[in-house]
Amino acid sequence: MSSRLEWLGSLPLEEAETHLLTCNASRTWARKMVANRPYADESSLIAAAVAGVVELSWFDVEEALSAHPRIGERTAARHQSEREAQWSADEQSGASEADARVLAELAAGNLAYEEQFGHVFLIRAAGRSAAEMLAELRHRLGNPVAEEHLVVRRELADITGRRVRKLLAEQ
């Protein structure tokens, strides 16, 4: 077992949950991750983190979404810790380099998406340009609700897995 994994396993329940909530703001997800400690290795932890997102109720997914800022916005979402705010800023660096036209289109697209689906547009922003995210946003506006829920879960699972890796890397 790695020392980073030992660190997570040795934390008191509430402290471990607080750290994990920076990876995914669903309390149900964080509690399950803490309850299932210890993990055999980091790969097992990441796999459990990703699988845990798929198992969440839609209510729990919406709770997780509440901590994600809109794509292209520099302000932190509600319930976001300093760590989450920094991670979001780093992940959205492709949007921060966009020109004013693309940012305006992202802002309008974010609002249209929220009107249609009732929650923030979620996409793994890391490694994507603003133009790529805008194209995906436009594409996903054509999804039926049930299909979009599946896409959101996949994106959230991807983001969660990446953030768990980041959390461990900071230790």
Image: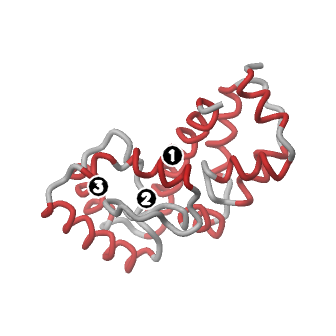
Q: Is label 2 in a helix, a strand or a loop?
A: loop
Q: Position of residue 40 (x, y in %)?
A: 78, 25
Tell me the kind of residue under disc 1. Ile
The quarter of the picture where residue 145 lies is bottom left
State the residue lying farthest toward the top.
1
Mark nearer the N terminus (1 vs 3): 3
Q: Horizontally, is 19 left or right of 13 in the view?
A: left
Contact (CB < 8 A) between labels 1 and 2? yes
Q: Horizontally, is 45 left or right of 39 in the view?
A: left
Q: Position of residue 10 (x, y in %)?
A: 85, 34
Could you tell me which residue is drawn at 76 percent across and 45 percent down?
33
Q: Position of residue 80 (x, y in %)?
A: 56, 61
Mark nearer the N terminus (2 vs 3): 2
Judge depth for marks 1 and 3 and give the one in front: 1
Q: Nearer the viewer, residue 50 or 95?
A: 95
Which label sits on residue 136? 3
Write down the residue under mark 2.
Answer: 122
Q: Is label 3 in a helix, a strand or a loop?
A: helix
Write down the residue under mark 1.
Answer: 159
Could you tell me which residue is drawn at 34 percent across and 63 percent down?
73
The quarter of the picture where residue 166 lies is top right
Quarter placement of the C terminus = top right
State the residue lying farthest toward the front.
82
Judge depth for marks 2 and 3 and give the one in front: 2
Tell me the kind of residue under disc 2. Leu
Q: State how many labels appear.
A: 3
Question: For the residues marked 1 and 3, what is the alpha-carbon distance in whole angstroms?
Answer: 16 Å
Label 3 Cα crowd, 10 Å radius (few <14 / some 14-19 / many 20+): few
